[in-house]
């Protein structure tokens, strides 16, 4: 289930807990971020499915998102348990960073939790298939993938160059365990 919890301190109870898309989006808008839900096939694509095949399967929705939010580039991350260098990828996700461009994710399969750091708060957004999350440029965040199932996300960027990551100066890696 999609979920948003807002914390002052991750080891304490959340200040806010929202589970419906409209309420999640309302809180996300405070950061210049967007949250939405769309209908997608609720099964992971074949592990052999290529980027083009996955994009084509969701072409109508992706075209609409690209137009509405002025995204300039798109790619696919299709991660299974046998993904090459999985541990390195997970470490990259869990390192707090930001991007100089707007970045978004449309979850096709699998899920996880995006952690956004802003205004002395941590926003923990749990995403599942059909969820769309768009983060504005320079918003500090990290991601904890649910490794119990394959992950397939379409990634959209406002930059034609795609993803450009700027690590936090101290390149803090999070192993996040939050109070629920």
Image: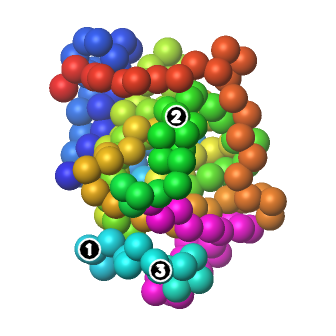
Q: Name the residue beneath numbered marker 2.
A: 91
Q: Residue at x 41, y 58 (%)?
A: 82
Element marked by disc 2: helix
In the rendered view, how is the structure colored?
Answer: rainbow
Q: Relative to residue 114, is residue 178 depicted above or below? A: above
Q: Relative to residue 63, is residue 96 depicted above or below? A: above
Q: Residue at x 20, y 52 (%)?
A: 1
Mark positioned earlier in the residue sequence (3 or 1): 1
The local crowd at label 2, few if under 14, some if 14 to 19, many if 20 or more residues have their Cα within 10 Å, is: some
Whole-Å distance between the Cαs marked 1 and 2?
27 Å
Asked whether, in this view, residue 44 is left or right of residue 13, the answer is: right
Query: What stretch of residues is rendered in magenta?
Result: 56-79
Q: Quadrant of the C terminus?
A: top left
Q: Residue at x 53, y 23 (%)?
A: 173
Magenta span includes 58: yes
Q: Name the residue beneath numbered marker 1.
A: 42
Q: Residue at x 72, y 18 (%)?
A: 169
Residue 116 locus on image (x, y percent): 49, 32
Foreground pick, 124 / 76: 76
Q: Name the residue beneath numbered marker 3.
A: 49
Whole-Å distance between the Cαs marked 3 and 2?
24 Å
């Amino acid at each position: 289930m999609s979920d948003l919890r807002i914390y002052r301190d991750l080891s304490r109870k959340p200040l806010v807990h929202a589970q419906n898309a409209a309420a999640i989006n309302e809180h996300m808008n405070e950061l210049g971020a967007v949250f939405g839900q769309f209908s997608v096939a609720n099964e992971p694509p074949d592990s052999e499915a290529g980027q083009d095949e996955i994009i084509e399967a969701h072409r109508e929705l992706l075209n609409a998102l690209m137009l509405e939010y002025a995204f300039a580039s798109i790619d696919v991350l299709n991660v299974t348990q046998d993904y090459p260098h999985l541990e390195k990828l997970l470490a990259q996700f869990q390192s707090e960073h930001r991007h100089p461009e707007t970045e978004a994710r449309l979850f096709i399969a699998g899920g996880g939790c995006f952690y956004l750091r802003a205004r002395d708060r941590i926003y923990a957004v749990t995403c599942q298939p059909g969820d769309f999350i768009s983060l504005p440029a320079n918003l500090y965040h990290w991601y904890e993938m649910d490794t119990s199932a394959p992950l397939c996300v379409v990634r959209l960027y406002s930059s034609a160059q795609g993803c450009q990551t700027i690590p936090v100066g101290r390149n803090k890696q999070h192993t996040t365990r939050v109070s629920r």
